Amino acid sequence: MSNFIAGLVGLLAGLLVNYLSDILPVRRRLTAPICLNCGKSQTLRNYLFWPRRCPHCNFRRSARTWVVEMVGVLGGLWLWNSTEAQQRLGLVVGMVVLIYFAVIVVIDYEHRLILHPTSIFGVVLGLGVGITLNGLTLTLIGGAVGYGVMYGLYFLGGVFIKLMARLRGQKIDEVALGFGDVNLTGVLGLMLGWPNVIIALFLSVLSAGVVSGILLFSRVLSRKYRSFMDAMPYGPFLILGAFLMLFLPLFTQTLLQSISPFF
């Protein structure tokens, strides 16, 4: 496969990610493309190619459309040219996993949701990937541990929110973790198996802490800091941890060795 074909496959993957990210939060199933503003159906030509503007309400698709497609092209080229990325999953399965990861990230970032349809598909994908890489036993243990650990954090987070609401005397609607994060961690646990899921969770928590610290510091400097309870989607950080373990194991090993003196 040439770089041209790899880039084309990546572009098609980006188109698919955009379609799924547009349609699933609204319809929860596969339908014809719709306008996110007025909800009316669009033709494939108008939606995928040009003018990418709703013929009914003249609503133009967001910049995310172009960003995802460019990232898709780069991802296809990277997957084709990276021996480390291919060595565990191969090209086809690797691309399917990347598409799944991208859909989770985009939807959770835009809607703060991890949908049941994506979780159900993820269980099937996770079992297939996990059993191939780690065998049935370690796959099931990884899924159970991932789900159980995140469920515990979800429960403790709920208790903490109720306590803070009582202390502040007002209802708090925003939560750090949703139940979709619990389902997602179970899916990723199936993919990664035991004990890799624990390492991925550590990387997820570490990356989320770093980003939260940077955002907090920037808000303090700009005097726009309101509350530490501001919600931040956690799904992208869970995906990051799993991505590092699945596609960049050598880099991840080096990273863990370099930061181990600090823990």
Image: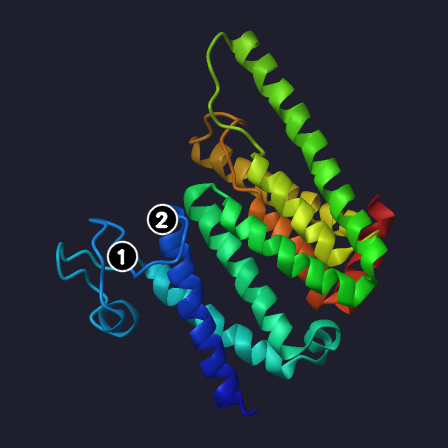
Q: Quadrant of the N terminus?
A: bottom right
Q: Nearer the viewer's eye, disc 2 or disc 1?
A: 2
Q: What is the three-letter code of the residue carrying label 1?
A: Ile
Q: Which of marks 2 and 1 is nearer the N terminus?
A: 2
Quarter of the figure with residue 257: bottom right
Element under disc 1: loop
Q: Is residue 203 left or right of residue 114?
A: right
Q: Which residue is drawn at 76% across and 50% down?
A: 197
Q: How far apart are marks 2 and 1 (CA)?
A: 10 Å
For label 2, the residue is 27
* Labels 2 and 1 touching (C-beta < 8 A): yes
**160 in relation to 54, above or below:** above
Identify the residue at image location x=68%, y=24%. Answer: 156
83 sits left or right of 60 in the view:
right
Q: Does the rendering let one see residue 254?
A: no
Q: Which colour scheme is used?
A: rainbow
Q: In this view, does 28 lie to the left or right of 243?
A: left
How crowded pointer 2 is (Cα within 10 Å; few <14, some 14-19, many 20+) is rated as few
Q: What element carries label 2?
A: helix
> How many labels, in total?
2
**How far from the left and from the top, in percent, is residue 78?**
59, 77
**In this view of the protein, can residue 247 be seen by the observer?**
yes
Q: What residue type is labelled 2?
A: Arg
Q: Name the residue under label 1.
A: 34
Q: Which label is found at residue 232?
A: none
Residue 183 lies in quadrant: top right
The residue shown at (55%, 8%) is 166
Viewer-proximal residue among 146 and 10: 146
Residue 122, placed above or below residue 177: below
User: 12 or 213: nearer the eye?
Assistant: 12
Q: Which residue is drawn at 77% across and 67% down?
A: 132
